[in-house]
Amino acid sequence: MEFREPIERLIRDPREFTKDIAFPDPKRLRIYDTSLRDGEQMCGIAYTPETKYEICKRLSDIGVHIMDVGFPAVSEDERRSLQLIMQGKRKGEIREDLDVVVMCRSTAKDIDATLTALAEIDVAPREVTFFVFTSGSDLHMKYKIGKALLAREGKDASEWLDLPLSFYRQANIRMQCDAIRYARSKGVERVEFGGEDGSRGDVDYFIDLFREGLKAGATRPSWPDTVGCLTPEATRWYSHRIVDALPKDVTLLNHFHNDYGLATINCITSLECGFTAFTVTANGYGERAGNVPLHQVVTALRVLYGIEIPGFKYHKLQDLARFMERVSGYPIQAHEPIIGANVFSHESGIHTHAMLIDRRMYEAVPADLVGGEMRFIYGKHSGLSVVEAALRKNEAALRARGVTVDAGLIGRVLDEVKRVREERAKTGRVEEIVDQYYANMSKLGLTEDDVLRIAESIGTAAQA
């Protein structure tokens, strides 16, 4: 339908309220995908090297800038995944400018193991970015890695609980910086670094950690909300202080988890404050409640804030979602924003009548922008308009079968649609479908009973 008035006079554009926000230049923004590491850490997910390669190809094609491939030193499969990805870059199947990140702890031993793993698959240290990480909160520094810091500083383990937090803070900075310098001395040109559990750490300490790491030769500080506990207000408080304290040409990376469902808005808030790289996963997969969903943050930035990521292929988001479901074994909820199977579907008579006039009546996310397609579902909430539209659309085919579409037929069809749907609701099939879903999900990983059966089998065989 053609409106007599401009659409801007009929509905208020949400960008009216965000147009004055000063984001970094979109050309500086970097999408950092960690589907192959954090995404695979979602319980029950396990990708083969070949699957990881296909995931990387699709994410490279859609427009991510940085790809975290995890720990190549831990297994042959991880090395094979990295090998396939680097070969894909050389063959042109993966973008040459994709920044590939490998991870290791802040120790010379871990760095050496990673360098050895790279050498085994013919990858030079300069071809990848090393993410050399440590801990960031006092809780983690003293009680998780405290004994390792004690040993490194030549302290006796008996001093663990008595030494003040200040000791662990300074020892941690020394360990981080030594690791950065060591990696650079081995030919690593790009070093990302940061401390786990940053959102529960002291901001001034993190600023010191970042400043010293940059002096030691690192190139990209990473600030994580490891347990997903930040609010947008807290994110703004931390982010402004970190951004203001560091050189303006430094690429600052955020890393949010979604434990309270706030990962997307926290990510956007930190970008508003001046962060220029942001961590995501395809479909939001990740440990516990997952990470920042790629589809949510890039679409919200574009539609609600007017920030378009140059070169990003928004129209491939739906296809990417279906692919990730198939390879992970985890379907996302049907009403997941932007990519859910039903987010562009309508059943209610009030809604379908309006959507037949113009999609913008109820479509906040443009379906064609993200590769979606509006469709109607017929059921107990349907109205005459949507049934008539379906019959009129297929009127020629019905006429060829001797069926005349008129008001009487439309009314009878609507009544039968409602009756059939209500009959289906009485079958109990819905409960069965849900039970099957959870039963199948439990089979993606091994249970404690599986572990005990394996132990029994091995132990029995050893005694034979």
Image (cartoon, rainbow, N blue to C red):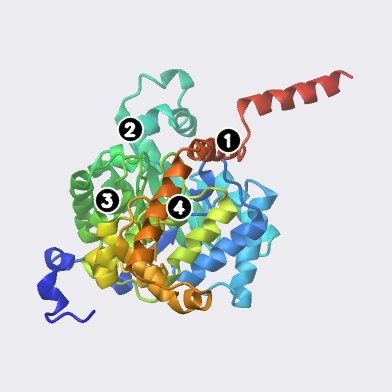
Q: CA gap, disc 3 to disc 2? A: 23 Å
Mark 1 secondary-structure assignment: helix
Mark carried by residue 69: none
Residue underneath mark 3: 266
Residue under the image location 35 percent in, 44 percent down: 258
First along the sequence among labels 4 and 1:
4
Q: Position of residue 388 (x, y in %)?
A: 35, 68
First along the sequence among labels 2 and 1:
2
Q: CA gap, disc 1 to disc 3? A: 34 Å
Q: CA gap, disc 4 to disc 1? A: 46 Å
Mark in the foreground, 4 or 1: 1
Vertical arrangement, residue 437 with respect to residue 79, above or below: above
Q: Which picture quadrant has residue 33?
A: bottom left
Residue underneath mark 4: 180
- At label 2, the amino acid type is Asp
Q: CA gap, disc 4 to disc 2? A: 21 Å
Report whether 208 appears left or right of 425.
left
Which quadrant, please, contains the N terminus? bottom left
Residue underneath mark 2: 138
Residue underneath mark 1: 439
Q: CA gap, disc 2 to disc 1? A: 40 Å
First along the sequence among labels 1 and 3:
3
Mark in the foreground, 2 or 1: 1
- At label 1, the amino acid type is Ala
